[in-house]
Amino acid sequence: MNGTKPKKVYFYGTCLVDLFFPDAGMAGIQLLRRAGVEVVFPEGQTCCGQPAFNCGYWEEARDVARTQVALFPQDLPVILPSGSCAGMMKVHYPELFHGQPDEAKVRAFSARVYELTQFLVDVLDVKLQDLGEPVKVTWHSSCHAVRDLGLKGEPQALIGQLANVELAPLAREYECCGFGGTFAVRHPEISGAMVTDKVADATATGASVVLSTDGGCLMNVNGALEAKRSKLKVQHIAEFLWERTRAR
Amino acid sequence: MHAEKEIHFRDAAAKALLDPQLRANFRRAMDGLITKRKAQFPDPRDLQDLRDLSTAIRSRSLLCLPELLEQLEASCTKNGIKVHWAETCEQANQLILGILQAKGAKTLVKGKSMVSEEMHLNAFLESKGIEALESDLGEYIIQLDGETPSHIIMPAIHKNKDQIARQFSQKIKDAKYTEDVDELTAMARKVLRQKFLDADAGLSGVNFAVAETGTLCLVENEGNGRMSTHVPPVHIAVMGLEKVVAQLEDVAPLYAILTRSATGQAVSTYFNLITGPRGAGEKDGPQEVHLVILDNGRSRIYADPQLRATLRCIRCGACMNHCPVYTRVGGHAYEAIYPGPIGKILTPQMEGVGVRHDLIHGSSLCGACGEVCPVEIPIPEILVRLRREATHDDMASTVAGKGTGRTATEDWAWRLWAGVTKRPALYRVATWFATRFGKALPASAPLIKNWTQSRTKPVPARRSLSERMRAEGASHE
Ligand code: SF4
């Protein structure tokens, strides 16, 4: 794929986007298509296996991961609208399959995995034209997107391309929102304190939308905002970018 | 082996979260430490270079740990430092008691030592009629209240100035109430000064022990470490067996990254290199120096190639300063000697992963700890590994309490999850039901109830992405 832009990619929806944020998934696919890329959406997608992996149930995680890897046989990039799940597939699959007979196959798969904004910026080098009304947004960086996967400001770069969008940073941009998968229900008090602080931080920015690349963070922050009957909304970055740039 | 009841981090944490003063104290203090550390590392490449070097030094030291420990013993002995080995805390306590009793010592003045906290040395000595007085200001403050450290570097960080002012005016004889930091420090200093002069023995920790030269390095800011180790006639140093490095050259980078990561200082006020007792014709220094090397579960951690990384730790505290959980619940909620992220991986390995199962799960795996750790300990990865160890009794595993955190409910839940998730047809049915009836789930259902403590219930979309793509007739291959 060096230098030349791929013509065709796989899209992996992820379980949370599939069930809770399908619009974000559709938007991600549209952004890719508009950039001239054909999108293949294999049937049989379920979950990357991260919840089981993080809880130490590696056999169960592997069983599931194997079925997912099998859905992407061709040597095409695999694009995910989630930093956390992309991190799981790219960084943690090789650990999970370490010493397994199919390790080499899984490693080859992992090497093809990208988070959506990463792919849009680093590989496709997309240029966006803002067609929306002026708006102030804030950005929540997902911990796994930054620390596991190693996103280096790609989402902010995309937001920066939009002329009418003001990005007001969070005071604690890199602090966890408290989701952490099962952590949110195993330690609801700590997780609750974290998301409450995140919501206060977001509110203080004066933004009207909190953007993120991760379904987990979005669900968490959205739930806390709704519980406070806040006017602030959350949106997946793909959906936000698509809504503002599509011709109507 | 660990038949004790599980200790629930959740309960203590929930309680701590309800204390606004405590939360404010920690948040303010941690914010300060984060800012100061950041100022010490203006160039990310320089930082990474220093981390690489420090990690390499610690890894290399661990690689030849048995040899280095032998060499350390030989070098120390040559320097006139008497070396003692203790497998358990009980043995270490008895050893120290023996040294003190042989000298007829009745009072011990202590510099800061987390290993002595591990041993519960103060309580042990008190039960034997020996007074152990903490001379580090923070340690002194908590000792006055009979508390344990809430941070490994700043043991009294859970208290603010006003709280300390009140405490001093009540607990120190003839003290007047003041909120002036210098006056408060002067008060403690007056008490401690006399104790240093009167003490029969002094005790300290060790930051690095140099195998080649038999040098004990001690990093401190108050001079109390130097006083504890040089004024009384006997100096006893205690260290965990992982603290050894090969040569003096190894110390400089570790020291540089330790003070910067810990308190955001380029150098500490004092850096003591202790190479033995007072020599013939010398005017000061102790007559005897003892080094007690404690195992207390460390060799067990050492036995596992992945978990061994835990022992790279140089106890800088940066992981706790940057931890979103620690910042909110404080150190005492961990009910452990070592709090924060390092405590989360160390404590379960020492006490048993089953007993501490709840603690191992008390992390969102956000990775802030691993990101700042000067010796790149992959704390989140180790947490995940320990979660596995807690619920699986793998034959080859050497982890304490392995498999004892397993419950039928969790096993069953993950098996069910995998059963559905690895069968796309079944999963499709499950998501279909979720999209159509997910709304109907009561907010009081188990787990959902925990979620809705602070949030509304998540409601599935009316049609899943897969369903929409199918309807769109998207290409599948
Ligand atoms: S684990 Fe790393 S960051 Fe934490 S105290 Fe040890 S050396 Fe410092």
Image (cartoon, grey):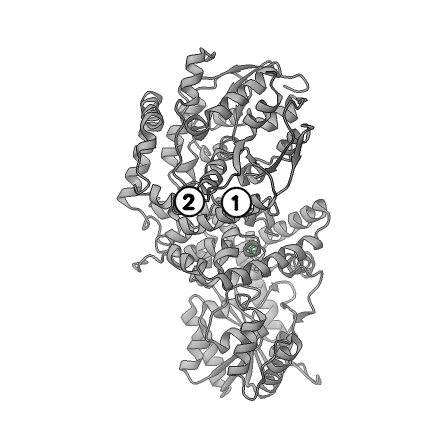
B138 to A175, vertically: above or below: below
Mark drawn on residue A199:
1
Task: Report the side of A73 relative to B401 (left or right).
Answer: right
Q: Is residue B85 visible?
A: no
Give whichever of A101, B71 is nearer the camera: A101
Looking at the rendering, the quadrant in which ligand 1 lies is bottom right
Question: Do labels 1 and 2 touch, CB within 8 Å?
Answer: no
| Dot 1: chain letter | A
Q: Position of residue B126 (x, y in %)?
A: 43, 81
- Secondary element under disc 2, as helix, strand or loop, is helix
| Residue in view at x 54 percent, y 75 percent | B141
**One can see residue B412 in this view:** yes
Specify the quadrant of the image occupied by residue B35.
bottom right
Label total for image:
2
- Respond yes or no on whether mark 1 lies under 8 Å from ligand 1: no
Which of these two is toward me, B433 or B251? B433
Q: Position of residue A38 (x, y in %)?
A: 56, 13
Please state the chain letter of the residue tagged with numbered disc 2 in the rendered image.
A
Badge 1: few (under 14), some or many (20 or more) residues near its Cα, within 10 Å? many
Of mark 1 and mark 2, the one earlier in the sequence is 2
- Give the mark toward the camera: 1 or 2: 1
Q: In the rendered view, tell whether residue A24 sits above or below residue A206.
A: above
| Badge 1 amino acid | Val
**Cα–Cα span, label 1 and label 2:** 15 Å
**Circle 1: element type:** helix
Residue where numbered disc 2 is placed: A184
Q: Nearer the viewer, residue B148 or A204?
A: A204
